[in-house]
Image: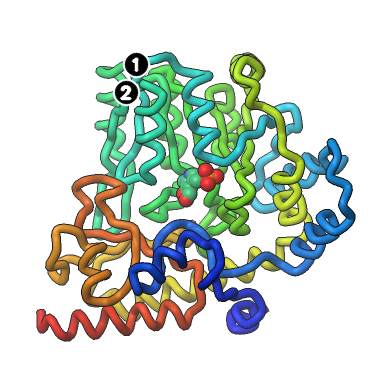
Amino acid sequence: MNNQTFTDKYYIDRNNTSSIKWSRGKQMNCLPMWIADMDFRCDDRIIDSLSDFIRYGDYGYANLPEDYYDTVIAWHKKRNHVTYQQEWFRSSKGAVDAMYQVIHALTKEKDCIMINTPLYPPFRNTILAARRRVVESKLIDTDGYFTFDYADIEKKFKEKKVKMLMLCSPHNPVGRVWKKGELEELFALCKKYKVLICSDEVHSDIIMPDQTFYPALAFKEYQDRIISIIAASKSFSLAVFSHSHIVIANEKLRNRFIAYQQFYHTGGINVCNALPTYYAYRYGEEWMDSLNNVVFENYHYIKDTLGSYLNMTSLEGSYLLFLDLGKYNDQESASQCLIDHCKILTNPGEAFSKRYNNWVRVNLATSLDNIKTAVKAITEYIEKTGK
Ligand SMILES: Cc1ncc(COP(=O)(O)O)c(C=O)c1O
């Protein structure tokens, strides 16, 4: 399906709905390009299947569809060349909830946990809420291309006796899809210093055409220290259903996690919330491919029009672009500058790391028309400054 056909069919007007993204945009009189959800509805077959379930009216205790796990496993095998086994799966009500449970179950109070910044804020907040210590290793920024600082990571692993690395793969907000060699080098350090790896892979379905995504559990040599968090919530914009999976291959580690879930009675799967994931993986492949093309086109439009003025990440995965307003920012926060001068609402860079107050995170999962509106407003502002 070409991009215009996809947009005509699936773009939805989210004004006057309960959408957090659009309500806040309206309140601030801005085009909302913040928060990580999409302005596209799901494929018709997903909506029809859910509607059939609702319409039939049997809301008693229910099993998951018999082939639920086969369907999830087949999706990841086909798209990401990783073979999960059904017994590796646990579930939780969303990816942030999963992070919190993993930290609680597999580390101790005051343990040091590493994150690579700038980073989606709940990583840090969850570690702190669980009363663990955050050890930050800054990503190296080379003109908007972010890479791990292995020397710094190793030094901190050693000095701080880090127990867990919270990896974001693909990375929010810097849009990196980590290369095989990058992950191998990182995982080898984790092995050397006995660090567990919790890999949040919720953006793994949105991968630009020239990139390959490597799921952490595909690295057999390191499988025994890996916990992956996977979900269809970002890929298909199913956040309202709060459903994700924690995948653990190592039986001992998994049993510790299961014991935690049993103790806190948190492991139960909500069938109603899992159904959209099932239908999405069954029927959503063509939709997903089209969505990827739309994001790619949006990214290129921004790169082509604003790239000569502004430094930005080279988007490899996710639909989130990290953009540096550079000399055009006349406020403490670049995000405020875009609100004041362009009527565009983005996520402030400083939310991802204090030192990124000159940056904003822009959500590209919208129509090209909205992207053009934003670009026009930014270009006019830039030209007006005369810089
Ligand atoms: C990397 C990452 N993990 C987790 C989440 C949140 O997931 P959930 O809503 O399932 O908690 C997001 C949301 O943007 C995200 O970008």
In the image, taking residue 387 as reference, residue 88 lies left or right, namely right
Q: Residues within 10 Å of mark 1 (few under 14, many from 20)?
A: few
Name the mark on residue 133. Answer: 2
Q: Where, quadrant-wise, is the N terminus in this rendering?
A: bottom right
Instruction: Give the SS element for disc 2.
Output: strand
Q: Residues within 10 Å of mark 2 (few under 14, many from 20)?
A: some
Residue at 71% from the left image edge and 67% from the top image edge: 43
Q: What is the spatial separation of the Cα atoms under label 2 and label 1, in whole angstroms?
A: 6 Å
Mark closer to the chain start, 2 or 1: 1
Q: Where, quadrant-wise, is the C terminus in this rendering?
A: bottom left
Q: Quadrant of residue 269?
A: top right
Name the mark on residue 295. Answer: none
Q: Tell me if I can see residue 303 in this picture.
A: yes
Residue at 66% from the left image edge and 41% from the top image edge: 82
Amino acid of disc 1: Lys
Instruction: Give the SS element for disc 1.
Output: loop
Out of 85 and 348, give the one closest to the viewer.
348
Q: Quadrant of residue 314?
A: bottom left
When the figure is inspected, residue 210 is found, relative to residue 232, above or below; the finding is: below
Amino acid of disc 2: Arg
Question: What is the x, y in percent for residue 276?
Answer: 72, 52
Circle 1 is placed at which residue position? 110
Q: Tell me if I can see residue 214 in this picture.
A: no
Disc 2: residue Cβ within 8 A of ligand 1's nearest atom = no
Out of 265 and 74, give the one closest to the viewer.
265
Disc 1: residue Cβ within 8 A of ligand 1's nearest atom = no
Question: What is the x, y in percent for residue 182?
Answer: 41, 41
Residue at 66% from the left image edge and 79% from the top image edge: 9
